[in-house]
Image (spheres, rainbow, N blue to C red):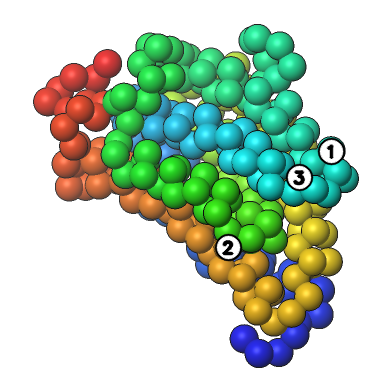
Amino acid sequence: MTVLLSPDELEAALRAVGAARYHNRHPFHQLLHGGKLDKRQVQAWALNRYCYQAAIPIKDAALMARTDDAELRRVWRQRLVDHDGTAPGEGGIVRWLALAEGLGLDRDTVVSERRALPATRFAVRAYVDFVRDRSLLEAVASSLTEMFSPTIISERVSGMLANYDFITRETLAYFNARLDQAPRDADFALDYVKRHARTPEQQQQAIAALTFKCDVLWAQLDALHHAYVSPGLIPPGAFGHEGVWS
């Protein structure tokens, strides 16, 4: 890309990435939301997704540690509060563990991440490393998948409540707060990217960063589909290997 886009054109290019590559299009999510999975497959999703949820405040802390922009740190630290809370028993990670326990999973097993798929752990680590090692602009741009999350949350909650008798609104309470938090965070990050991507190269880096993040989310679902749907090859040590669902 050699032409400098206007801020609105850059936003349109970023949104086009989500329209084409966001993980609501993945076959595993379509099965999940459509009620086509059994309870063990849903448990596998929740257990593996915890690895990603637990890494979010780690990558956000890494981003904050890299900038001398006090305003950016003030705004970004709200993300830590959202996920970690301000006291034990608060925050999004606790709510995700409540979701996992509501599905019948053992809390300590989920937190240990020892039964997660290797590909899940590799994808999550790649995201944390990306935020730590790439430019600050790319780190912020990689968070812009939040522009698209309200759609998938609405699909997930309505679909799972309608199709699974082992799911309740209380089980899915994690997603209530995200309907407000994600748009707030995305608005700030999008404005930041539009103001700081001042050259064609920087704009391309921002678009590539969002593409990378979509790939991270997609790769996690690829691993779930491969292990628990088709061909059903669960790697050694992972949840469900050799019939061990605990």
Residue 185 is tagged as 3
As drawn, 11 above or below 103: below
- State yes or no: discs 3 and 2 in contact (Cβ < 8 Å): no
- Left or right position of 236 against 226: left
For the N terminus, the image quarter is bottom right
Q: What element carries label 3?
A: helix
Mark carried by residue 209: 2
Residue 139 vs residue 113, the one in the foreground: 139
Q: Visible in this render: residue 43?
A: no
**Quadrant of residue 96 within the rendered picture:** top right
Residue that appears at 36% across and 16% down: 109
Callout 2: SS: helix
User: How far apart are the two marked residues, 3 and 2, measured between alpha carbons?
Assistant: 17 Å
- Left or right: 71, with 175 as reference point: right
Q: Residue 74 carries which label?
A: 1
Do the CB atoms of the residues marked 3 and 1 lie less than 8 Å apart?
no
Return the disc, 3 or 2, that comes first in the chain's sequence. Answer: 3
Q: Residue at x 80, y 41 (%)?
A: 73
Q: 173 or 165, which is in the foreground?
A: 173
Q: Residue at x 65, y 27 (%)?
A: 83
Q: How far apart are marks 3 and 1 (CA)?
A: 12 Å
